[in-house]
Amino acid sequence: SVFSETGSLPNVPDSYIDSSDPNSTSSVGKLNLGVPSSGSGESRIFLTFDLSELPFPSTMTPTNVLLSLYRYNVTGTSPLTVGVYACDTFNENNVTWNTAPACSTNEITRTTLLVSPETGEQYWDITSLAQANAASGNHTISIMLKTVGTPSSGHLFYDSSHSDYP
C-alpha cells in the first residue's frame, strides 16, 4: 500500500533466465516463469527492490509485504507451484542462466498458480524476508521465483518497464 498511497515506486531491476537458452538475457516487457516459450527447459524470474529509494524511517519494520505480478498469458493445462528464494543482487542487463546470482536454497514462501483465469494479479507473501532484511539494516530485497519440481506450464508476466497495467 505504500506504493499506491505515496505514488513513490523504487526502481525494480527484473529479469528472467531460460535453461534452454543459457547465454541469453531476457526480453524487455515480459517475465517468463515455468516452461519457456521454446517449450522445453525452465524459466526463472529475478527481482530486486531497493527500499532505500523510498522515504521510510530508519526504524521501519515491515508488517505485511506482498509481491504482486500481473500475469497476462498461460501455456499448458497444469497448475504451477512457485517458490520464492532470497538472492544476491544482479545486473538485469547481464543475467543469464549461466551467470545467475547465488540464491538461498531455503524457500521463503510458495504459491500455486492456476491456469485460469489466464490474466490477473498473482501474489507471494515475502514479509519474513523483508523483516529479516530490515532488522539487519539491508534495505534491498532480491529474490528468485522458481518452479517447485518440473515445470508443466508457462506463465508470462509484465516486467517493470510495462507502464500501463490493465
Image (cartoon, rainbow, N blue to C red):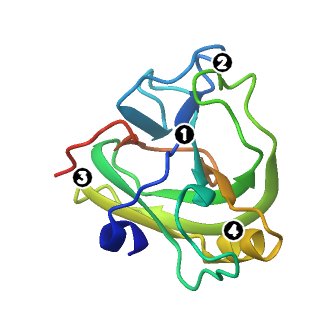
Inter-mark Cα distance, 3 to 4: 25 Å
In this rendering, the label closer to the viewer, 2 or 1: 1
User: Mark 3 vs mark 4: which is more N-terminal?
Assistant: 4
Residue at screen point 65% across, 26% down: 95
Quadrant position of residue 154: top left
Residue occupied by mark 2: 22
Type of amino acid under label 4 = Ile
Type of amino acid under label 3 = Glu
Mark carried by residue 118: 3
Residue at screen point 49% across, 45% down: 11
Query: Residue 8: x and y, percent?
Result: 39, 60
Residue closest to the eye, 93 or 79:
93
Residue occupied by mark 1: 13
Inter-mark Cα distance, 2 to 1: 19 Å
Residue closest to the eye, 49 or 37:
49
In this rendering, the label closer to the viewer, 3 or 4: 4
Mark carried by residue 108: 4
Inter-mark Cα distance, 2 to 4: 25 Å
Q: Is residue 98 left or right of residue 119?
A: right
Inter-mark Cα distance, 3 to 1: 25 Å
